[in-house]
Amino acid sequence: MIYQIYPRSFQDSNGDGIGDLQGIMKRLDYLEQLGIDGIWLSPVCKSPQDDNGYDISDYQDIDPMFGSLSDMEQLIEEAKKHGIRIIMDLVLNHTSDEHPWFKEAKSGRDNPYHDYYVWRDGEEGTPPNGMRACFGGSAWQWVPEVGQYYFHQFSVKQPDLNWDNPRVRQEIFEMIRWWMDKGVGGFRLDVIDQIAKVPDKGITNNGPMLHTYIEELSRETFQKGDLVTVGEAWGATPELAKLYSNPDGREFSMVFQFEHINLDQQEGKEKWDLAPLPFLKLKEIFNQWQTSLYGCGWNSLFWDNHDLPRIVSRWGDDGKYRTESAKMLATLLHGMQGTPYIYQGEELGMTNVKYDIQDYRDIETLHMYQERKDAGYREEEIMASIYAKSRDNARTPMQWDGGKYAGFSEREPWIRVNPNYREINSEAQVGVAGSVFEYYRKLVKMRKEYPVLTDGRFRLLLEKDEQIFAYVRENEESRILVVCNFFGKPALCELEEAWDEAELLIGNYEGENDRPGEMRDGFLEVLRPYEARMYLARR
Ligand code: TEU
Ligand code: CA
């Protein structure tokens, strides 16, 4: 069970309005209560913070904003005492343009570091090709000192590293081993499927050398320790995921894939071009991932991260049925096979925000706003995209209590607190029956109690039902049934197979009305709005 912390938004300890490592240490009891085993910590290395730490200028030091290297060592040790390992975020596709390697690289073509990055000749004003950077604009940046362009898939302050250079790979491996010696429990690998780019052919993801490089990386580093590793791979398909997460350990433990995430955007367009959520498609995709990796790979299970809008505002209802729908979405995810990830605040049912444009901080959001303004989009249309998809939805401060700044900081935070913090916060939920937090805690516990949740085979039911997501997990000893109503109106759930003597393990209306229902000759239940239930039957 892994919990993701976005450090600048989790807990401030020194009143500068920015979360930090000492802040995380204060909340280890909370995380232990939730029952998690690992923390994926978004980048805390030294960084100019152009992309909130995903632009690293020193891989072997901590940004003073977050603390010091000894704070980090302390966190690793303290977390261990709570049964929690720290999973570092490795950003290996690019560095900051303020990294010493890049400063050297751009000082001259003959500099030994020049070839650490991706350069192409060209004329000023005429980039090598029309490739676009992820945060807008050309992917090529002219450097007059060397009379060349460098390649950047993200911001201009994030030059891409040249993985074709063996010296780059060696330096990276050494740096990783250094962190391993410090006792970290694993790594999350940022945009790892983009390291083997071939810009001349327009290739970003899944370049021809990708798996060769990953195998070498794994051999030279991870395989020398006992680690969990997860690669971020926007371009992953189930077939590719079998390579990445092959149980022989040649590459990673697992990858984050995004097929279930990219559904609410217009085909072939950007994430900002909104489209309704296709429910049947969601079932189809999860079904495909669950069945095709069974026995030959491993899934990661997630709804949220620091780049994505809040799931309760996306697939749930963040108004009337916020609590019910947050729990329903958790049930659906935690019943499946794989390693579940909880993103900070998801366990409280935290929601998206609607701010004025000047209150947004994310580089991607701000670039898009300007670009679409210039292109003549209407203000309301741009803001609607931002409300639905801005990464800042996930980056508002963690809501700890109903006090000023939600208990996150004593001073005005770097980004506004979600105005609903008085109602939605951890103090109002920890130890409180019926809360989203207690529900997550129970799910986390169940995952460790019932082996069928780990190893059971997945079987989708009611594939064509327009409202219900239902599936079975089964092994030799037992069967689990998960039924979820994804909408705000009741739904009749009728299954042919019998679930007599099944025990209700968890349900989001539990207690209110534990009807046994008609289980004998099949299964017949009316599911209330966003209702979810999980049953267990022994064989
Ligand atoms: O994200 C990769 C990535 O492709 C995202 O930029 C994604 O396209 C976008 O967030 C969707 O809205 C990783 C990190 O998770 C992200 O925070 C970084 O900005 C990015 O890499 C660059 O390091
Ligand atoms: Ca701080």
Image: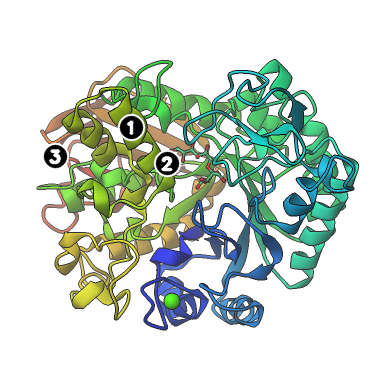
State yes or no: Cβ of the residue under disc 2 lies below 8 Å from any atom of ligand 1: yes
Residue 77 image point, x, y percent: 63, 80
- Residue 11 appears in the rendering: yes
State yes or no: Cβ of the residue under disc 1 lies below 8 Å from any atom of ligand 1: no
Secondary structure, mark 2, is helix
The residue mark sitting in front, 1 or 2, is 2
How far apart, in angstroms, are the residues tagged by discs 3 and 2?
35 Å
What's the amino acid at mark 2?
Glu
Q: Residue at x 65, y 26 (%)?
A: 124
- Label 1 close to label 2 by CB (< 8 Å): no
| Front residue of 340 and 445 | 340
What's the amino acid at mark 3?
Pro
Residue 214 image point, x, y percent: 77, 39
Residue 489 image point, x, y percent: 10, 33
| Front residue of 330 and 463 | 330
Query: Badge 2 is on which residue?
Result: 364
Point out the tag, 3 or 2, that comes first from the N-terminus: 2
Left or right of 240, for residue 50: left
Q: Quadrant of residue 122?
A: top right
| Front residue of 297 and 161 | 161
Left or right of 171, for residue 92: left
Point out the tag, 1 or 2, that comes first from the N-terminus: 2
Query: Badge 3 is on which residue?
Result: 529
How far apart, in angstroms, are the residues tagged by discs 1 and 2?
36 Å
Tag shown at residue 470: 1
